[in-house]
Image (spheres, rainbow, N blue to C red):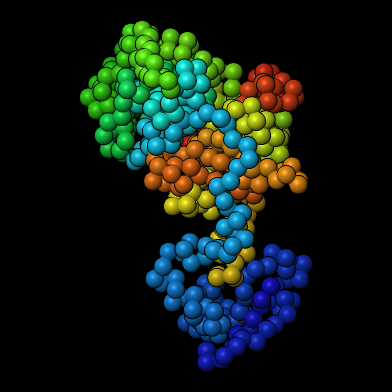
């Protein structure tokens, strides 16, 4: 810790002082990493001409800071602090000794572009792996329709929103924290694994060519804004109907009409998708060039051709704020009224990694949620907590642990991707780095592939999806018991990837 006593503005090097001259000795540990300059200023606000002069003098007394100022004023901060030594490059290689044998190509219909559909893409990439295996398809010629799920998710979210507005109208003021939370982003692009389960159970799946992307699905901000404004308008009317004592049949009719209006908006912008029972013909050439075709529908395609039981898979999370080996859900978080709730089994990070390794060794790709915006490079696709050296440039020590980051809003699940491999150190039998399939297209990362170090996994991975086959009996029993701890609607674990 550096502690300084005030000096004239023209001083070359501030004079050091003992900790006890500035702060209570009992609390000195709280000041680690903070450079203090003592002043005689008794004002409540520490910012004054005198203090500014002292801070400037202290800053410029170190030649390194002058160099840093010159560089940082002209260059992206992360480019300045990124490590480029050979040891870092060796550590962050795209080399993995355990990978799944089949996974669809990151280059084929796997770019969410300017939308927040990563959870749908991640789930679709897991589903398509099963189809590719089942029918010996070329990995760069098959994908699940993300827009099909996107359409019905938004329609269901609109209905779920109106149901919540009705349920809270009598007891919650318009400006209450809960009501404002409901109004904030009722049909946002984000979602979670259990929302995928709700969608595929009700609507099934279709191949990408049956309902492909269009402009609105790949650049969804304008559509979201328009639908949200309409839903807020309907919410005000619905609240008045409830407060003024309208009959249940009138309220039901109003909500049905409002949802129909949302359907019209979605149909005119995204297009009209097949209904779950509408027949279509799925035709393709397999790896050997043999033509095959099936007459099917969305529900049958999911059950008969995808053959992946999404409902048998559940989320393991690492949330060090809360007790491990317990089941959690989040209040008011869902996409389909009457659908299954969000279900998280909280467990230790080492257990999550053990499960992930078992899955990869069994050729199972892994849906996972993380905070991808931390210590990551979109160009190289490297996620590495040690790749950036803030300490050397800024002389700061502001590291928070994982629980603290959740508590203060510094981190949460922001993005869903798929883990497809791991590199295990032969000498220690411990994971070193993990291979990821992202959904940002082939021009991001290493041709669409990302890599996270094991340290990054510890700090910024919050969730993986697995099933009974790979978890401990204790973990599975916790999930099956359905004894929920309900987190509040504003909890960071309610964030949607």
Looking at this view, is 342 or 118 the one in front? 118
Looking at this view, is 361 or 27 the one in front? 361
Which quarter of the picture shows residue 63?
A: bottom right
Left or right of 250: which side holds 375? right
Residue positioned most to the front:
288
Indicate the quadrant containing the N terminus: top left, top right, bottom left or bottom right: bottom right
- Residue under the image location 37 percent in, 32 percent down: 109
Q: Is residue 246 visible?
A: no
- Residue under the image location 56 percent in, 35 percent down: 420
Looking at the rendered structure, the number of numbered marks drawn on it comes to 0
Which quarter of the picture shows residue 473?
A: top right
Left or right of 46: which side holds 204? left
- Residue under the image location 31 percent in, 26 percent down: 212
Residue 62 picture location, percent across and down? 56, 82
Q: Is residue 325 above or below residue 244?
A: below
Q: Is residue 134 above or below residue 432?
A: above
Looking at this view, is 335 or 77 the one in front? 77
Looking at this view, is 49 or 134 the one in front? 134
Q: Is residue 27 above or below residue 368?
A: below
Which quarter of the picture shows residue 213?
A: top left
Residue 116 picture location, percent across and down? 40, 37
Residue 77 picture location, percent across and down? 46, 64
Residue 470 picture location, percent across and down? 68, 25
- Residue under the image location 56 percent in, 30 percent down: 101
Q: Is residue 273 above or below residue 487?
A: above
Residue positioned most to the left:
268
Q: Is residue 34 visible?
A: yes
């Amino acid at each position: 810790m550096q502690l300084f006593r005030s000096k004239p503005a023209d001083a070359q090097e501030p004079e050091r002082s003992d900790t006890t001259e500035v702060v209570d000795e009992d609390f000195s540990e709280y000041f680690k990493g903070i450079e203090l300059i003592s002043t005689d200023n008794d004002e409540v606000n520490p910012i004054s001409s005198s203090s500014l002069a002292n801070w400037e003098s202290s800053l410029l007394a170190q030649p390194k800071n002058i160099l840093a100022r010159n560089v940082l004023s002209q260059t992206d901060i992360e480019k300045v602090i990124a490590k480029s030594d050979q040891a870092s490059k060796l550590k962050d290689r795209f080399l993995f000794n355990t990978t799944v044998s089949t996974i669809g190509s990151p280059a084929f219909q796997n770019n969410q572009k300017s939308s927040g559909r990563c959870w749908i893409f991640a789930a679709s990439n897991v589903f398509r792996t099963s189809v590719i295996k089942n029918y010996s398809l070329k990995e760069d010629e098959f994908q699940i329709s993300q827009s099909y799920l996107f359409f019905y998710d938004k329609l269901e979210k609109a209905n779920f929103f109106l149901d919540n507005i009705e349920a809270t109208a009598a007891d919650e003021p318009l400006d209450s924290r809960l009501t404002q939370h409901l109004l904030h982003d009722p049909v946002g692009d984000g979602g979670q694994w259990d929302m995928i389960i709700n969608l595929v159970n009700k609507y099934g799946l279709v191949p990408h060519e049956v309902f492909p992307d269009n402009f609105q699905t790949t650049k969804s901000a304008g559509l979201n804004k328009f639908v949200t404004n309409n839903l807020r308008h309907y919410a005000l009317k619905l609240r008045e109907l409830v407060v003024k004592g309208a009959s249940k049949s009138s309220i039901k009719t109003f909500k049905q009409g409002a949802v129909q209006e949302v359907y019209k908006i979605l149909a005119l912008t995204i297009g009209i998708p097949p209904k779950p029972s509408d027949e279509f013909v799925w035709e393709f050439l397999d790896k050997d060039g043999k033509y095959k075709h099936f007459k099917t529908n969305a529900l049958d395609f999911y059950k008969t051709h995808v053959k992946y039981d999404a409902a048998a898979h559940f989320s393991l999370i690492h949330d060090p704020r809360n007790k491990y080996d317990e089941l959690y859900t989040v209040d008011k978080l869902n996409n389909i009224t009457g659908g299954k709730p969000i279900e998280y089994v909280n467990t230790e990070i080492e257990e999550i990694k053990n499960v992930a390794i078992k899955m990869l060794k069994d050729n199972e790709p892994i849906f996972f949620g993380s905070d991808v915006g931390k210590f990551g490079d979109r160009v190289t696709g490297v996620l590495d907590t040690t790749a950036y050296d803030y300490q050397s440039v800024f002389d700061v020590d502001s590291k928070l642990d994982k629980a603290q980051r959740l508590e203060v809003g510094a981190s949460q699940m922001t993005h869903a991707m798929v883990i497809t491999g791991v590199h295990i150190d032969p000498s220690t039998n411990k994971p070193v780095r993990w291979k990821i399939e992202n959904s940002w297209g082939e021009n991001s990362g290493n041709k669409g592939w990302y890599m996270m170090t094991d340290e990054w996994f510890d700090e910024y991975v919050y969730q993986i999806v697995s099933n009974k086959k790979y978890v401990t009996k204790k973990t599975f029993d916790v999930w099956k018991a359905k004894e929920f701890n309900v987190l509040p609607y504003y909890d960071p674990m309610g964030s949607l990837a």
